[in-house]
Amino acid sequence: MPLTGTKVADVSGSVATSYATKLMADYGATVVNFEGGGFMTRDLAPFHPGTQVSAMHGFLQQNKASVSRFATPQELNGFDVVFYDSETTSISCETNTSAISWFGKSGPYAGYNGSDAIIHAMTGLMRGIGPIEGPPIIPSGYEAQIIGGLTAYIGTLGYLLGQSLGNQKPQFDLDTSIWEANLCLTEVGMVAAYNTATVAPRMGINSFPPTYPLGIFPCRDGWLGVTVLTPSQWREFCKLLDIEELLEEPRYHSSMARLADRDLIEPKVLAKLLQFSAEDLFYQGQQARIPLARVPTMEELFNVDQYIARQTFGTVEQGDQQFQAPNVPFRLFSTPPHFGGPVAELGEHNLSWSTL
Amino acid sequence: MTDTLPLTGIRIVDLSMGWAGPLAARHLADMGAQVIKVESCTRFDWWRSWEATPEWIEDNGAEKALAYLYVNRNKLDITLDLEDDAGRALLLDLVGRADGVIENYSGGVLPKLNLDYPHLKQANPQIVMVSMPAFGSTGPWAEFRAYGSTIEHSSGLPHLQGSQDDPPVMQHVAFGDAIAGLNGAAAMLTALWHRQKTGEGQFVDLSQAECVMALGVQGILQFSTTRQTPQRYGNHHPDHSPHGVYPCAGDDQWILLQVFNESQWQSLADLSGLNLDAFTDHTLRIKNRRELNELLAKWTSTQSADTLMTTLQNAGVPAAHLKSALDLLEDPHLLAREYLQWLDREHVGLQPHPSPPYRPGAAPVTIRTPAPTLGQHNRAILGELLGQPDTRLQVLEAQGIIGTKPRMP
């Protein structure tokens, strides 16, 4: 596997450090969790029914080793890179380090309380979600930390590769800000705001500039995701729904003009969509090169033919529990990642970690 | 031992367009890789425009698209008509001298052009090719089309947002693009790492829809472990109160408050100056959350969101101003970290560029060059690197295979 032989330590066990090291473990790195006190991921919902065993911990920590104590600096020096949360953990070692924290190591917010929701608020993402009159809607889950961990994986692997190429000194200390990592979702707004001195307004649930129809709409039997952007997609969409009279308005070939007239167009679109099956429209739309989508529930997700065919979900083994979780979304064909895998018990590798 | 940018010496051919692929390639370029973006004069990056007109071309609209500019900095740009044999041959010559190729065409496009992995591998057996179609390059949906919005729709994520009474809720106009872009960079680096160790190139298949699933993993795990559909709580938290988004002074100004423990609650109560005696107990705060939220909203609506965030955070209370794009341009933390870097570019003047979110020291990684203009590096790449003489470049330009100005298809 690509990262076989690469030794990685996680000494903090935040969602972000755990996700970065999960990607490394999935691609073959030896990842050792030094869990003095147990990682906080063990306390994260959801839990296996009737237990306090966290499936979230299982998802994040599969294919890693667990040591139930803190590491010494000398021990850390034996790793190629050490991941840590610089807000909760201080480390001293002479190897590569990769710090991930809510706001980075420096700056006036460096000590602020962080959370996934706080990051979404401060990137501007949250302002755009929800009804026009507000309040904006808080996104759920651990999104911000997952994005932070993924971003730290990119930086860390890039700098490790740089060392291997002879471009970098023998030791690096990377600082990844979860906030800055998540600004990738809204940075285009910043650039636009600088040039126009305006901010895109919140337009209601599932409505966003720069186009209409865009959103999630009810059909006869379920939800359909719709995105119509280009003139050709608009033409095909009108044909598909048999609302070709709208094509007679030349302005509607412009996505922004359709958005401006959303209140005029929407009643016709909604009425027509309710006459059709979402499933039928999805396939017919894709055939007509319109990017329509099913909008699967959690239950339906496991039954989507595309995801079954691709083994999107793998089996995680956690004690006597087994469950399905998403596999790594990028697949190296010659050297594939682990698909699922075992989760170590706390301290399972206390005696064996140095020989892994 | 040197300390240049880490990916110095790596050459990437960037066939991608829009947001996802270009963002992936941007990370590689930011870390020092030579990223050569390949467009054509008739099939230029659609992020320059999806509604091109002759007037737009005449006005140099292709060089003014803001979304294009910030996601393509640090890259070079050439034009090649890949539907022409000569254009394809030049691309294969370039691939022969590259380490990686990244693309996010809809499935089926590159095979029709004879530019899929088997063909690229013939040109360069060690090439790494990262392919980023919407649903991956295998399975019954391999050739289906999608935007970043479609990716979000398809991932299950909208069923985890909002409250039970809401429809499935989207978070962003193109959520899937940015997430897939990050995964694309991770994919290329993983394969380049393997290549560095073994000399072996390979094909890398990325499903943009699967990239988003990690972000809704808590819902996926809940269904997988309990067979029950996750509840949607909106802005409430089932175990904590107060928890939500509250109005502040001014137009569309909001603050997020999240109280997770007694210490935070006490600090909030003290700072608010409100009589909150009826809510001292955690269970009462949960039970009477509506009344508590009304009281707090009345108070927050008289406060500046940014000042209140600072006050509460300094007192240890998790709080955040729901910042706008304009707020971010002047944010003191981002200014202190020199997060935005400013580069001058032809046609648009000085423009802000977000720094890479990882930094090897106190200062961010320097952004070296603004986004290239269409075909700006035709001479440097096709002439100097691939050895095409000027006379040949003139012929290619006359034939419309290369150029520096868009044309209507």
Image (spheres, helix red, strand yellow):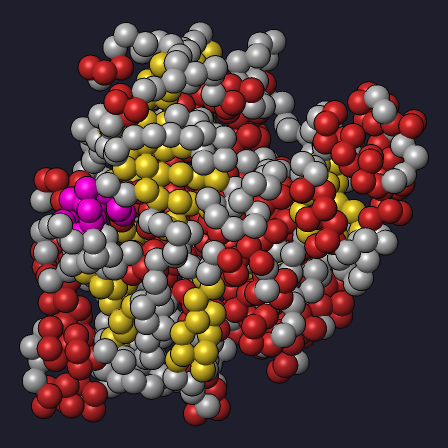
Query: Within the image, what quadrant is residue A21 found in?
Result: top left
Residue at image point 31% right, 11% down: A349
Q: Is residue B72 visible?
A: yes
Tell whether B35 sits left or right of B171.
left
Q: Nearer the viewer, residue A128 or A209?
A: A128
Residue found at x 84% / y 21%: B281
Relative to residue A229, is residue A221 drawn left or right? right
Residue in front for this viewpoint, B240 or B89: B240
For the C terminus of chain B, which image quadrant?
Answer: bottom left
Residue A338 in the image: above or below residue A20 = above
At x 14%, y 66%, the residue is: B94
User: Does the segment drawn in magenta span residue A137?
Assistant: no
Image label count: 0
**Rendered location of residue B144, percent (x, y):** 42, 53
* Percent x, y of residue A155: 33, 46
Q: Position of residue A202 (x, y in %)?
A: 70, 60
Measured from the top left, where is residue B336 in percent x and y?
51, 58
Prevailing secondary structure class for the magenta stretch in the rendered image:
helix
Taking A250 as reference, is A13 above or below it? Answer: above
Q: Quadrant location of residue B393? A: bottom left
Residue at x 15%, y 44% (from the top left corner): A164
In this rendering, position of residue B183 left or right of residue A168: right
Q: Is residue A314 visible?
A: no
Start-end of magenta stretch: A158-170
